[in-house]
Image (spheres, rainbow, N blue to C red):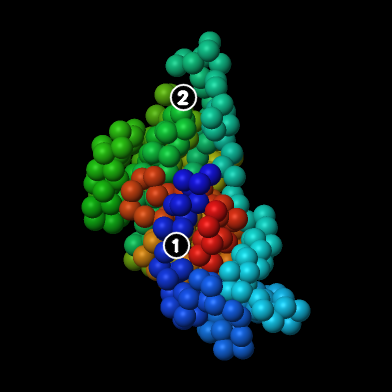
Amino acid sequence: MFGLFKKFKSGLAKTVAAIAAKTHGLFGGRKIDAASLEELEEALYTADFGVETTAEILKEIKEAYRQDPGLQGKQAAELGAAVLRRVLAGSEGVLAGGARPPGALGSENAPGGRVPPSNPTVIALIGVNGSGKTTTSAKLGWLLKQDGRGVTLAACDTFRAAAVEQLKSWATRLDLEIVASHTGADSAAVAFDAWQAAKARHRDFLIVDTAGRLHTKSNLMDELAKIRRVLQKNDPTAPHHAWLVVDGSLGSNSIEQARVFHKSFGLTGLVVTKLDGTSRGGAIVGIWRELRLPIYFLGLGEQPEDLQPFNAANYARAVFGLDD
C-alpha cells in the first residue's frame, strides 16, 4: 500500500505544492489563524475543489479551530482529508469482468491454466483528442496484462492522423495484442474484427480506443453510436464499460465535456489523466459531485505503471500533503 500511496503523492505533487505555496506552508507546522484560513480558502478554489467542497472543508476546520485555538496546520490537513474521503464515498470504480477476479488463479484444465471467458469484457474509452485516450488504452492493457488477464486492443481512432500508429507503437513497446487498420478505415469495422479476434483467442478484455473528434460533434456521436451497434451484433451487452478519459489539467471545465458525452453515449465511469502536470487536482471531486460517475483510474505520470486505480483515501491524504 505504501508504494501505491507514494505514486499518488508524487503524481499530485503540483497540486500539493500550489496549496502549500498559497498557504505559506500551513500544513508543514504552522498554527491555524484567521489569515491562514483565508489563504486555505483561496488555495482550495485555485486547485479547483469548487465552492461546495471548499465550504465543507473550511466549516470543519473552523469548528475545530473554535474549539481549540491552538489547532495545528497538520491537524487541519487531517480534517480536510477526512472531508474529502466523506465527499468521495462511493466514487471508486471497481473493474468487473474477464475470466476471474484480479490475482485469482484460473482452472488448471482450461487453456493456459485459465478459465476462458464466454465473451470478452469490452471497455470503450471515449474522449476528445488530447485527453490521453490512446495512451491510456495502452497503459490499461498493460496493467491488466500484469494481472494475468488476456487483452486485445482495438485501434478505432482511425480519423486522427497517426493515432493508429501511436497505439501500434505502444502495443509493440508493451507486448500487447492489437487489431488495427489504416487511417481513414471504418472504425466500426475495426471494432467488429477486434471483438471477433478477442473472442477467438479467449481474451478477457477488449479495449476500444475510439475517435476523439470528427468534423462536427454530431458526426463524432454518430460514429460512437455506430461502434456500439456493431459491438452489440457480437454481444448485446457490449460495451460493458464506457469510460470518459478527461485531461485533469482542464479542471472544472471537464464537467461540461463529461455531461455531453454522458448524455450522448451513456458513460459508466471516468479516467482522469495528466494529474502530474497540473495544480488543479481538486477537479476530480467536482466531477464526482456533479455526475456521480465512478472514477476508475488516475493518470499520475508518463510511464505505464503511472496509471493507477483510483483510491479515495490515498487521493485525499496526498492532496493535503499528508503521509500514508
Q: Residue furthest front?
A: 70
Label 1: element kind: loop
Instruction: Answer with left or right where residue 212 lies relative to residue 90.
Output: left
Above or below — where is 19 with respect to 131? below
Mark 2 or mark 1, earlier in chain: 1
**Which residue occupies the extreme right position in the image?**
67
On screen, residue 129 above or below 37: above
Name the residue carrying label 2.
Answer: 202
Examine the rendered structure and indicate whether residue 195 appears above or below residue 292. Answer: above
Tell which of 261 and 149 is nearer to you.
149
Residue at far top of view: 109
How far apart are labels 2 and 1 at the CA level? 38 Å
Q: Residue under label 1, please give it.
A: 12
Give how far across and how far down residue 265 sits, in percent. 53, 57
Pointers 2 and 1 in contact (CB under 8 A)?
A: no
Residue type, label 2:
His
Whether residue 267 is visible here, answered yes or no, is no
* Image depth: mark 2 or mark 1 in front: 1
Point out residue 291 in the picture as x, y percentages from the top left corner. Answer: 61, 64
Foreground pick, 34 / 60: 34
Q: Residues within 10 Å of mark 1 (few under 14, many from 20)?
A: many
Residue 100, horizontal then vertical, whole percent: 57, 28
The numbered dot on residue 236 is: none
Q: Is residue 24 left or right of residue 139?
A: right
- Residue 78 visible, this orientation: yes
User: Residue at left 57%, top 35%?
Assistant: 97
Mark 2 lies on a secondary structure that is loop
Give the residue type at disc 1.
Leu
Residues 52 and 74: in front is 74
**Front-most of 111 and 48?**
48
Left or right of 102 in this view: 132 = left
